[in-house]
């Protein structure tokens, strides 16, 4: 089972970000939040520690590195007490270059955190400012070197392309800079303008022009080629890694494996049931305070007192979820795996659809699997929309 | 005059749309004590939801009321409501023929409108006593003196004693009722004479068949009579005679001067046509009542089942509507682009919009309507004539000697500050100005001859939008006229989509073609390939736009295992696809068909 832990605090909200995070939260509120996280771990541990084996942990945000590492320490203690954590577990933490210090990095390593994910986004300071990032390219590179010095052996760099005003040349420069640092893993996300973000309101006011799709796709295509040439395996639409360094936690999302999300707004998928937590900080904390959750357990239909939504997947839901997530992997869907899981062949269920999109050049069908072509990765939603 | 006739008052209310006709009818009904205020739905007489929503009356409703006047006598009021739109002139004229008087409502804030005038002329044609009434006097912008002056100057009837009322607030209604008693003449006619009764409306009832609204002029009619409809020459046995008060109340007979309904196992309304004369089969009248005419549709369009809708469902619904609407015609037709559907004929654009909306709302059907078209007279080289109402059926240009199109006389009333822009609009629409007159200092009446084809292309909306809603329009067919017309075709990805074809005047072809191409470019979503949109006359392309291919449709990120978010996005995408119609390799949203017809303010 994968464990995701959400830390919803940031120094500043980035202009493109619509993730659940808060800026300028007072100390006592973040204290209360961590207190509640420990309660939530406690709630699940009773049922889960003897059944599930935690082999990946992902501390995401928000900006987990913003928080004093003593909180992360308490959190990791609770995780190890509450769950059976595999000794070879992949344990990641998301960091923002501006907020990381050498002391924090050392502390993370001490806590057994063995994978660092750095939100570099770009190596162009002007674009970083435009994105609303608090760090500079210099901050990022210094941090990266510190992390190596401290002994991190598995580092991911997050990058964004398709930023308004970004040229292909600037993107190439960023990619080459980052590849030059030899991180084990690189994520490269095409910028999405999401409702509720600063960028979105700029778009509506007409002060922001969306990046031309053609340019966006040439950036993407350049990234795939350069990364492959540089020894990275392009294994998911927006992810590449050196051999053996694929993000095991994220792979669970793309392989329909179980994961438990802890913290505000976190999503879980456990044995065919999807559920998600409340998104109000106050509400979350109050549930921890007031809810006698342990007594409630046996009488309540809901999986967790902290969740506000749950859905038991039918077999059709599972097939649909499987298709729309597993196809994100470049290797696509193995026919055998599909048949083993669902007892019916993919070809038998969706033969016509597969052929239709094969003819359109979106997917490739081989003897053992179906996967996206390069064009298919650009237009994945067209194919995936057939399965919802 | 027979004594019972002295206490009958048959009247209707005529007014421009929105001048408060239905509200006044409500007040009259309420104040005569038939229905208590609490039981009343707003606008009692308009009993179709659609009518209530649009605030217009489409279908006539007749109600018998009883009123105790100040003279101590009990009067029977037969209130005959009339539709207030240009498309239903004939129906209006037949309801007027059933009355002795007409209440003319003039809005104190707006004055006399084109439609008011048109209806007044119809009423005068029927020799009705006109009772002007000034409504909406409660509004701050009311100018009752001006309205009275307008009535006297424009219509030429006395209006100085017109009651000043507010139907909405119930002001002046009692005075109005007395005014009706005193001013509307009692009906005449010989109850012992040979039966002559006018059909002025009919509707279909699931249990009783067609219910016919009638005004008896001579003689009487009762259950068991064998009647003959003198124009359609059909015979029926009367199964029920009654009056509406407000629900159906059977009576023993209806005599000369009375208004009521009859049932006679008539299967559909087209068998009991408005304007026809009912007489007794064994003792017939020697001549028919004047004014009967078989109404002809003026506007045609194609109605097709949308993606996923069954042809049979659309056919059944059309049949049901036709049972109740003699003016609505349909027959099967096929379109290469849209498959099997129907060509439908309507009295006018409003009539068409109402039918389409009823199909969508009452019958919950998914349908596509094609560009409305008028009937063209095509004269071929060999001298034969063809009437064409579907642009796709236009013979090859080499076979055509010339084409003639229907011309209407359009009367437009506007405040004077809009004269310039409306004259410009009429000119754009190939109007030929006949004359212009000042009705008052501030209001102008423009008279044009205009091709009907231009009027149905959203002329009314354009008029409304250019005059901030103050313009009004009335039109009537006058003749066919030779004209330089061409068929404009639209090609998507090089393939002709026949459902978009339209017949336009050569001088407008270029701008219309460009407009349609631009509209379609906005509406057709990007495909995996470029989609050229072309407007063409024959082989000649006169306008072109291109929908760029899209290159990116992928979610970069999955948010911390939040699959539901991705799923929602994909579901939305799939839903959008359902509303698409496939033409060759191109997917077109269904709204494209209506969007290309809409008047564009920014044009």
Image (tube, coloured by chain):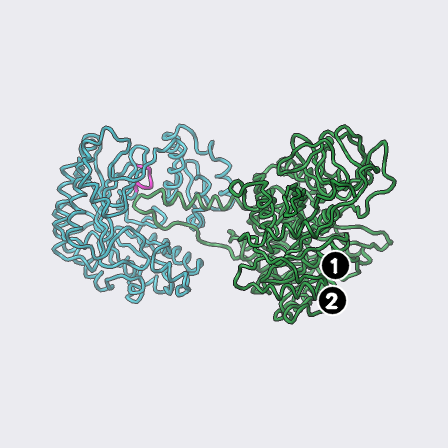
Chain colours: A cyan, B green
- Circle 1 Cα neighbour tier, 10 Å, few/some/many (<14 / 14–19 / ≥20): many
Q: Which residue is mark 2?
A: B432
Residue B193, percent across and down? 84, 38
Q: Residue furthest front?
A: B72
Asked if residue A254 lies in the magenta stretch, the reply is yes
Choose between B575 and A248: the one closer to the eye: B575
Asked if residue B134 lies in the magenta stretch, the reply is no
Q: Which residue is mark 1?
A: B408
Res B336 visible: no
Instruction: Find the magenta span and give its range.
Output: A251-257
Residue B256, percent across and down? 77, 40
- Circle 2 Cα neighbour tier, 10 Å, few/some/many (<14 / 14–19 / ≥20): some
A105 over B422 or under it: above or below: above
- Distance from label 2 to label 1 (Cα)? 10 Å
Choose between B111 and A62: the one closer to the eye: B111
Q: Is residue B393 left or right of residue A224?
A: right
Number of numbered discs overlaid on the protein picture: 2
Q: Quadrant of the N terminus of chain A?
A: top left
Determine contact: label 2, label 1, CB under 8 Å. no
Residue B514, percent across and down? 62, 62
Give residue B288's quadrant in the image.
top right
Residue B435, percent across and down? 74, 69
B492 over B228 or under it: above or below: below
Q: Secondary structure at mark 2?
A: strand
Q: Secondary structure at mark 1?
A: strand
Q: What residue do we see at 28% from left, 49% from top?
A: A242
């Amino acid at each position: 089972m994968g464990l995701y832990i959400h830390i919803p605090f940031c120094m500043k909200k980035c202009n493109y970000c619509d993730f659940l995070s808060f800026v300028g939260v007072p100390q006592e509120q973040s204290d209360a939040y961590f207190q509640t996280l420990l309660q939530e771990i406690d709630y699940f541990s009773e049922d889960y520690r003897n059944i599930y084996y935690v082999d990946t942990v992902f501390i995401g945000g928000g900006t987990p590195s913003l928080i004093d590492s003593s909180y992360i320490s308490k959190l990791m203690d609770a995780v190890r007490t509450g769950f059976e954590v595999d000794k070879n577990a992949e344990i990641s933490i998301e960091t923002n270059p501006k907020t990381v210090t050498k002391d924090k990095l050392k502390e993370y390593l001490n806590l057994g955190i063995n994978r660092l994910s750095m939100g570099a986004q770009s190596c162009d300071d002007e674009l970083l400012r435009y994105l609303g990032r608090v760090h500079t390219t210099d901050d990022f590179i210094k941090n990266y070197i510190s992390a190596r010095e401290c002994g991190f052996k598995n580092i991911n760099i997050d990058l964004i392309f398709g930023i308004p005003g970004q040229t292909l040349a600037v993107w190439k420069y960023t990619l080459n800079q980052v590849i030059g640092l030899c991180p084990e893993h690189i994520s490269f996300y095409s910028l999405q303008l999401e409702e509720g973000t600063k960028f979105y309101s700029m778009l509506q006011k007409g002060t922001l022009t969306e990046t031309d799709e053609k340019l966006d796709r040439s950036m993407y295509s350049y990234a795939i080629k350069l990364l492959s040439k540089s020894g990275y395996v392009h294994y998911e639409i927006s992810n590449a890694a050196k051999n053996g360094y694929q993000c095991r936690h994220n792979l669970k999302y793309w392989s329909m494996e179980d994961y438990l999300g802890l913290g505000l707004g976190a999503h879980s998928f456990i044995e065919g049931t999807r559920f998600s937590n409340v998104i109000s900080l106050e509400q979350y904390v109050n549930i921890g305070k007031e809810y006698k959750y342990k007594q409630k357990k046996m009488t309540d239909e809901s999986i967790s007192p902290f969740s506000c939504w749950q859905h038991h997947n039918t077999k059709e839901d599972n097939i649909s979820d499987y298709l729309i997530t597993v196809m994100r992997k470049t290797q696509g869907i193995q026919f055998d795996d599909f048949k083993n899981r669902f007892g019916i062949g993919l070809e038998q269920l969706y033969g016509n659809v597969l052929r239709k999109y094969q003819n359109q050049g979106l997917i490739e069908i081989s003897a053992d699997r179906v996967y996206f072509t390069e064009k298919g990765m650009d237009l994945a939603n067209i194919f995936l929309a057939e399965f919802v | 005059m027979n004594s019972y006739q002295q206490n009958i008052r048959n009247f209707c209310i005529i007014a421009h749309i929105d001048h408060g006709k239905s509200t006044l009818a409500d007040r009259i009904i309420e104040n005569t004590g038939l229905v208590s205020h609490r039981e009343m739905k707003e606008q009692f007489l308009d009993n179709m939801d659609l009518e209530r929503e649009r605030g217009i009356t489409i279908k006539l409703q007749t109600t018998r009321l009883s009123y105790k006047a100040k003279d101590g006598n009990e009067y029977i009021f037969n209130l005959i409501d009339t539709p207030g739109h240009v498309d239903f002139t004939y129906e209006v004229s037949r309801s007027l023929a059933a009355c002795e008087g007409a209440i003319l409502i003039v809005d104190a804030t707006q004055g006399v409108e084109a439609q008011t005038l048109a209806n007044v002329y119809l009423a005068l044609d029927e020799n009705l006593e006109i009772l002007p009434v000034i409504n909406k006097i409660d509004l701050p912008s009311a100018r009752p003196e001006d309205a009275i002056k307008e009535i006297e100057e424009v219509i030429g009837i006395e209006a100085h004693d017109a009651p000043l009322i507010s139907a909405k607030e119930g002001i002046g209604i009692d005075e109005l009722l007395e005014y009706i008693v005193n001013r509307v003449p009692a009906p005449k006619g010989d109850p012992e004479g040979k039966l002559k009764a006018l059909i002025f409306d009919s509707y279909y009832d699931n249990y009783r068949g067609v219910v016919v609204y009638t005004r008896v002029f001579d003689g009487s009619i009762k259950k068991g009579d064998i009647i003959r409809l003198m124009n359609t020459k059909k015979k029926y046995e009367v199964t029920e005679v009654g009056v509406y008060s407000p629900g159906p109340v059977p009576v023993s007979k209806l005599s000369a001067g009375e208004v009521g309904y009859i049932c006679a196992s008539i299967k559909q309304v087209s068998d009991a046509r408005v304007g026809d004369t009912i007489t007794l089969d064994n003792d017939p009248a020697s001549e028919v009542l004047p004014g009967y005419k078989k109404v002809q549709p003026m506007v045609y369009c194609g109605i097709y089942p949308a993606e996923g809708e069954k042809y049979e469902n659309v056919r059944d619904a059309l049949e049901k509507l036709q049972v109740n609407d003699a003016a609505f015609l349909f027959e099967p037709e096929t379109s290469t682009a849209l498959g099997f559907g129907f060509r439908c004929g309507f009295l006018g654009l409003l009539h068409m919009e109402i039918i389409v909306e009823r199909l969508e709302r009452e019958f919950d059907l998914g349908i596509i309507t094609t560009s409305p078209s008028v009937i063209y007279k095509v004269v071929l080289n060999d001298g034969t004539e063809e009437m064409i109402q579907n642009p796709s059926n236009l013979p090859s240009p080499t076979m055509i000697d010339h084409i003639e199109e229907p011309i209407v006389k359009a009367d437009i009333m506007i405040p004077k500050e809009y004269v310039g822009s409306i004259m410009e609009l009429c000119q754009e629409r190939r109007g030929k100005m006949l004359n212009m007159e000042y009705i008052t200092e501030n209001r102008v009446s423009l008279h044009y001859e205009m091709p009907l084809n231009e009027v149905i292309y959203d002329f009314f909306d354009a008029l409304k939008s250019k005059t901030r809603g103050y313009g009004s329009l009335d039109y009537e067919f006058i003749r066919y006229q030779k004209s330089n017309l061409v068929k404009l075709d639209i090609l998507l990805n090089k393939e002709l989509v026949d459902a978009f074809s339209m017949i336009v005047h050569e001088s407008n072809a270029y701008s219309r073609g460009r407009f349609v191409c631009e509209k379609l470019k906005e509406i057709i979503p990007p495909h995996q390939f470029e989609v050229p949109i072309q407007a063409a006359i024959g082989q000649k392309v006169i306008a072109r736009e291109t929908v760029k291919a899209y290159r990116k449709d992928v979610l970069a990120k999955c948010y911390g295992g939040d699959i539901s978010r991705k799923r929602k996005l994909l579901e939305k995408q799939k839903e959008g696809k359902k509303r698409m119609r496939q033409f060759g390799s191109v997917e077109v949203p269904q709204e494209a068909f209506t969007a290309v017809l809409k008047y564009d303010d920014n044009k």
